[in-house]
Image (cartoon, rainbow, N blue to C red):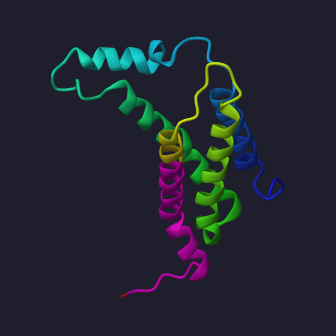
Amino acid sequence: MFSRHPIVSAMTLAYLAVVAWLTLTPSSTGLESGILGRLAGLLARYPETEWFTFMRLEFIANVAMFVPFGVFFILLFGRRRWWLAILVGVLMTLGIEGIQQFIPSRVPDIRDLAANSLGTTVGALLALTLTMTSTRARRDGGKRVSA
């Protein structure tokens, strides 16, 4: 894997380090006073966007954080193992949530499991979609077939 895809492997390791830092270190401030909390406060000022609460923004952020996991997994291990990307993403999230119960100021949450799993699934589907044409081209030997 590392020798076949060194750049994607390095990007994946960097991404996993950031995820570990975001999820496995004590938070220095309350979540609602961070960027998402400030954004939720800003959106709450307007009637059109007041439904965008902190909890909804946090859910979306957790989905977005795990989309790259699904993409990287498919790029590194191949399209045939798409289901394994989702399984590993769920297991990784279970591990993160389990460890968080021992970290000060962290609270395990079933919504994080759902959001991270959804993000991994979206990422895997995105990678499957984006790699579909290159897979067809390799399978067809690069030949164009006219209809």
The image shows residue 94, relative to residue 36, as above or below, that is below
Q: Is residue 85 left or right of residue 43?
A: right
User: Looking at the picture, how far across and down is residue 46, in whole percent?
Assistant: 19, 18
Point out residue 139 in the picture as x, y percentages from the top left corner: 59, 81
Quadrant location of the C terminus in the rendered image: bottom left
Task: Give left or right: position of 16 versus 59.
Answer: right
The residue drawn where x is 50% and y is 69% is 133
Residue nearer the viewer, 12 or 136: 12
State whether residue 81 is above or below residue 76.
below
Left or right: where 141 falls relative to 63: right
Residue shown at 48% from the left, 47% from the top: 114
Instruction: Give the main secondary structure, helix, strand or loop, of the magenta stretch.
Output: helix
Please provide percent x and percent y for residue 131. 54, 64
In the image shown, does 64 or 127 lie closer to the viewer?
64
Q: What segment carries the magenta color?
A: 117-146
How far from the left and from the top, in percent, is residue 80? 62, 72
Which residue in the rendered view is the most extreme toward the front? 101
